[in-house]
Image (spheres, coloured by chain):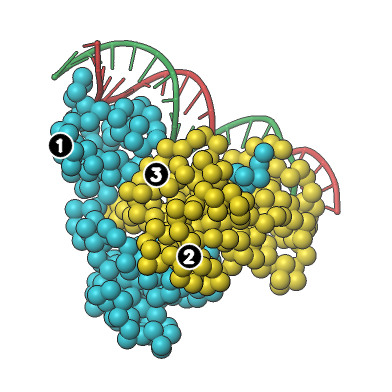
Chain colours: A yellow, B cyan, C red, D green
DNA sequence: TCCTGTGAAATTCTTCACAGCC
DNA sequence: GGCTGTGAAGAATTTCACAGGA
């Protein structure tokens, strides 16, 4: 399978949402122009993005919503279940544990950890907060694929290293610390202050 | 002031964090190579990014941490206070209200809103949850500059439009809905499912 | 010697534009 | 006529590489 450019992957993820809406609405085909309008891009961009799948769009008609949905889900690895562990049961970790719609997309939260003894043992949705001391053992036992890192920034590197050592190869990082990890570990960052600062810049630049 | 490229703005925000650490550590100068190592980029990239400020680095020495910090803060508009309102007092909204370190960066959360009558009136940190029906009036009265949108996706467009009409020109959007807004409103997205899907893709692509 | 500043080259990503099929 | 697929052009971004100051 050809390697797909990073910006394309992000857009595929967006297209998928609109496709699901279109499919629910009973539309059996969709044109690149319609997808472009939903996704805030251009029809040429959409066609380029979809050209990874070979040519299965129909000229004059568009793409089969059903087939396109299936293709994108496969490319994004959404045709299977991923086990997710959350480290840090503070406000962000808790929010992620209860994030609506993750399970139906195949992201199953199988554990949430915290270091605070007062939190360990408490119930959170249908999980019980586990002690972060058992992180490695639990990650292995539960075959966790993805970790959500929601610990204070000064602990992020340490926890991330432990996750990597335990076999986790994908981390969604809410901390603001730079992480040094083995190359085979993919990290995506959700950096709240950084995004606010980008907004600040946009407001200030006038 | 010359327009700064989007990726550059993001990196400036990262550099700023490391600079603050360096300054705390008592370092008075820093080289592009050191910044690059912290920020996961290259020294040439750092120098290009900083070339917006004209040439005030010293050859053989590097940059003054103090001056560089001040320059970046100014570029990012962090030399002033921004008023932030949060819409949605669910888990994500609450997490943002309590996000550690925003205030000291100049992001003052001045109000949090919710539509649920059971939540309205409750205390959250040092705020009282306000009724979203008063959104426009409060936004104007409090001179809100930035809004954090943490409402269910099916309500995001409606609330965003109200915010824009009330004068908000910057939105940090946690929903997964596509927003259609006047051009002068800047939106940054924190799309959790999208990032997880990018991780899923990275894991699946082997 | 160390490190900046910056044109030029390379790379990545987006847009254009049009042939061709339904 | 409407819409795809795709080379080619264009724009944006990163990397190279080196002259020159501290």
Mark 3 or mark 2, which is nearer the start of the sequence?
A: 2
Report the Cα–Cα distance between label 1 and label 3.
23 Å
Q: Element type at marker 1?
A: loop
What residue is rendered at 59% in x and 40% in y?
Answer: A5
What residue is rendered at 23% in x and 53% in y?
Answer: B78
**Who is closer to the viewer here, B134 or C9?**
B134
Contact check, label 2 and label 3, Cβ < 8 Å:
no
**Whole-percent x and y of residue A205?**
28, 52
**Whole-percent x and y of residue B37?**
35, 31
**Whole-percent x and y of residue B106?**
22, 59
- Image mark count: 3
Q: Element type at marker 3?
A: helix
Quadrant in which the N terminus of chain B appears: top left
Report the Cα–Cα distance between label 2 and label 3.
21 Å
- The label nearer to you, 2 versus 3, is 2
B15 shown above or below B161: above
B178 shown above or below B122: above
Q: Which mark is residue A129?
A: 2
**Whole-percent x and y of residue B79?**
19, 53
Q: Are marks 2 and 3 on the same chain?
A: yes
What residue is rendered at 30% in x and 80% in y?
Answer: B123
**Who is closer to the viewer here, B35 or A187?**
A187
Q: Which mark is residue B26?
A: 1
**Who is closer to the viewer here, A140 or D20?**
A140
Q: Name the chain under label 3.
A: A
Can see residue A39? no
**Who is closer to the viewer here, A19 or B4?**
A19
């Amino acid at each position: 399978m050809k390697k797909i450019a990073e910006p394309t992957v992000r857009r595929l993820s967006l297209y998928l949402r609109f496709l699901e809406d279109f499919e629910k609405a009973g539309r059996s085909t969709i044109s690149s122009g319609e997808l472009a309008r939903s996704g805030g891009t251009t029809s040429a961009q959409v066609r380029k993005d979809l050209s990874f799948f070979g040519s299965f769009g129909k000229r004059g008609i568009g793409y089969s919503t059903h087939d396109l949905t299936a293709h994108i889900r496969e490319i994004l690895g959404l045709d299977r279940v991923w086990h997710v562990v959350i480290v840090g049961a503070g406000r962000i970790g808790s929010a992620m544990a209860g994030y609506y719609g993750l399970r139906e997309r195949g992201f199953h939260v199988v554990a949430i950890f915290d270091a605070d003894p007062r939190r360990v043992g408490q119930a959170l949705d249908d999980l019980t907060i586990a002690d972060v001391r058992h992180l490695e053992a639990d990650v292995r036992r539960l075959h966790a694929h993805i970790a959500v890192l929601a610990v204070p920034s000064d602990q992020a590197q340490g926890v991330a290293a432990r996750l990597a050592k335990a076999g986790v190869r994908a981390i969604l990082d809410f901390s603001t610390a730079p992480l040094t990890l083995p190359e085979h570990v993919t990290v995506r960052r959700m950096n709240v202050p950084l995004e606010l600062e980008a907004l600040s810049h946009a407001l200030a630049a006038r």
